[in-house]
Amino acid sequence: MQIISAVVLLGVLIFVHELGHFLFAKYLGVSVLKFSLGFGPRIIGKKWGETEYQLAAFPLGGFVKMLGEEPGEELQDCDKDRAFNYQPVWKRMAIVIAGPFFNIVFAAVLFSFLMMTGLPGLIPQIGEVLEDSPAQRAGIQKDDRIIEVDGISVDRWEEMRDIIHARAGKELSISVKRDDQILTFNITPETKIDKNIFGEDTQVGLIGVVPSGEVEKTSLPFFQAVDWGLKKTWWWCKMTVISIVKLIQKVIPADTLGGPLLIMQMAGQQAEQGAESFLMFMAIISINLGILNLFPIPILDGGHVVFMSIEAIRKKPLKAKTVEIAQKAGLFMILGIMVFALYNDILRFVSDRAAQ
């Protein structure tokens, strides 16, 4: 199950990524010679028009081969109009960015679809009111269901929590449903020090309530679901970038970095929990793939964008030797990260086995 789930997960995400490059290249008039899902020997393939489509033996990757993409590739004059390296910088940059962009858009589509079909979540119902807390002093009681905070309708506990956390020391208007009544209370959240998701101390507003633990499946109409999906995608994009920064700053321990074994394990776990969990995990990994590919490391899409930006400023491309050296350095860096992540995976696997 873990292997199959990981192959499906990575296969879909790589296909989406390469499809972005492919469609933008076609749209902008660049000739695509090969569209491959996977690396290595071809399993199946067929040529339609000028493009050969193939499924290769190793599904952990893929590529789109465009005419004139290789440095020093000899071309006839009649082919140069459709060759990648003879296109204006903006066209080449658009084709390169399209891969990560498709991954991020794909995540938004998945999030929106999941919210339209319905997602389970903690409802904003009070399970306990803490002694001498702002909520108790205001008159909020156990089993009250919060329906609105400062004029913002809330359907989930996390929505209510995020608003209250951000309003420390500021008076809030909180509306609750109690039996058949709608009651409104003015409450000022206390400023407390709490741990954020990275384990850092941060100031938050708290009113002293605990959730009932009741879960409901909620869905939204199309446009509201799309809005929710876009916001969720933006949040995960920010969290991905912040997590990488925190990793570099050593706020997040380096041994938490995972590789293919961790992805395989988590993909299997999410698949066992059902299609919703698996698709949610796929959306998150898709965002990670898109953001990481935009980092300015030679050999990644972000590295190509840097080369093209320098070319646009200099009005001429970098020397082929310079690009080659930079790409070798980028490849060495990526391989180093992958080996370290695999080392962490193995240690984690051995540790888990020993604990059983």
Image (tube, grey):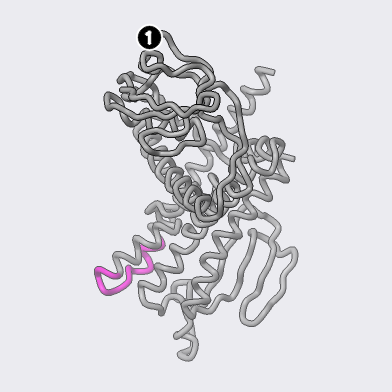
Q: Which residue is mark 1?
A: 132
Q: Position of residue 283 (x, y in %)?
A: 56, 48
User: Where 88 sits versus 330, above or below?
Assistant: below
Q: Nearer the viewer, residue 105 or 247?
A: 105
User: Where 143 sits versus 250, above or below?
Assistant: above
Which residue extends farthest top? 131
- Name the main secondary structure of what is drawn in magenta: helix
1 sits left or right of 144 in the view: right
Q: Position of residue 219 (x, y in %)?
A: 59, 44
127 sits left or right of 266 in the view: left
Say whether residue 56 is magenta.
Answer: no
State the image quarter where residue 109 is shown: bottom right
Using the rendered image of the protein, determine whether residue 185 is visible from the camera's viewpoint.
Answer: yes
Q: Position of residue 130 (x, y in %)?
A: 44, 12
Residue type marked 1: Asp
State the image quarter where residue 166 is shown: top left
Q: Nearer the viewer, residue 44 or 212?
A: 212
Magenta stretch: give its range: 312-324
Say whether residue 320 is magenta.
Answer: yes
